[in-house]
Image: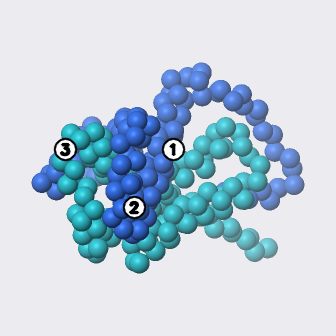
Chain colours: A cyan, B blue
Amino acid sequence: MKKKYIRSNEPVVWGLFGAGGMVAAFLLPVLILVTGILVPLGIVDDNVLSYQRVLTFSEHWLGKILLLITISLSMWHGIHRFYHGLHDFGQENHRRLTFFLCYGFALLITVLTALLLLS
Amino acid sequence: MSTQTSKRKPFQQKMSPNWWLKNRAYRDYMLRSATCIFVMLYALILLWGLYALSNGETAYNAWLAAQQELIFVVFHLVTLIAMLYHSKTWFMLAPKTIRIQLGATIIGDKVIESAMWLSWLVCSTIIIALLLY
């Protein structure tokens, strides 16, 4: 009898989770410090995040890649832990639906970010 | 995602909702997992900023002004702490996924963890310098 193997999707989502974990560990602390604390509290000059400066950054190809990586991979990272967290709290119903809702959301965020950067 | 092919109803151990409070290691695990909420919320704030940016200067400045509200400042302070905790736990995990062998010696866990922190420091300094100057 030929055995039917079902391929796991875990390597793909774990890969995105791992990459996102690196982004979150290396980039997010310093980004949060600047965009969420130093600039809003006026500790550094307003010009750091001025419209012209951020616009120029977002129009450069390297800026586009960095923004896409930061936003989308953070999302893939977060949603992976969230999805497995549901299991930790005993939420075992509709696992397949939850899977598509969770990772579908991360995909949606990725597409939206890419569309904004390309427009 | 697991695929159940067996007809047998598997035994499932009932877990209390607070099982993770009973042990230090479980609490740390849950705390580490909880950082994902802050990662996702911050990613959404950046996306909101990007959307505002695409809508022109007035919309972008409104996004900047919103970040000055108390609730956002508090959120970012908490998120900064959560992210530093994420970095700490992520670098502690690094030796488990990165295994470097030089000749007969295997690079120790502490060396890899320290190398991660050093890279983190260099990376953060470069970003701060590029953003502020």
A97 lies left or right of B59: right
What is the secondary structure assignment of the residue under circle 3? loop
Which mark is on residue B37?
1
Quadrant (top left, top right, bottom left, bottom right) of the N terminus of chain B? bottom right
Look at discs 2 and 1 and give the one toward the viewer: 2
Which kind of residue does numbered mark 3 sit on?
Val
Which kind of residue does numbered mark 2 sit on?
Ala
Identify the residue at image location x=39%, y=54%.
B63
Chain that bears disc 2: B
Distance from disc 3 to disc 2, alpha carbons, whole Å, reads: 22 Å
Are the residues flagged by discs 3 and 2 from a single subunit?
no
Q: Residues within 10 Å of mark 3 (few under 14, many from 20)?
A: some
Chain that bears disc 3: A
Q: Is residue B115 visible?
A: no
Nearer-N-terminus badge (2/1): 1
Q: Is residue B4 visible?
A: yes
Are the residues flagged by discs 2 and 1 from a single subunit?
yes
Instruction: Find out whether the residues at labels 2 and 1 contact each other: C-beta distance under 8 Å.
Output: no
B131 lies left or right of A3: left
Are the residues flagged by discs 3 and 1 from a single subunit?
no
Which mark is on residue B59?
2
Q: Which of the 4 quarters of the picture holds residue B60? A: bottom left
Instruction: Find out whether the residues at labels 3 and 1 contact each other: C-beta distance under 8 Å.
Output: no
Q: Residue furthest left?
A: B133
Look at discs 3 and 2 and give the one toward the viewer: 2
What is the secondary structure assignment of the residue under circle 2? helix
Q: Which residue is mark 3?
A: A44
Distance from disc 2 to disc 1, alpha carbons, whole Å, reads: 26 Å
Identify the residue at image location x=87%, y=55%.
B7
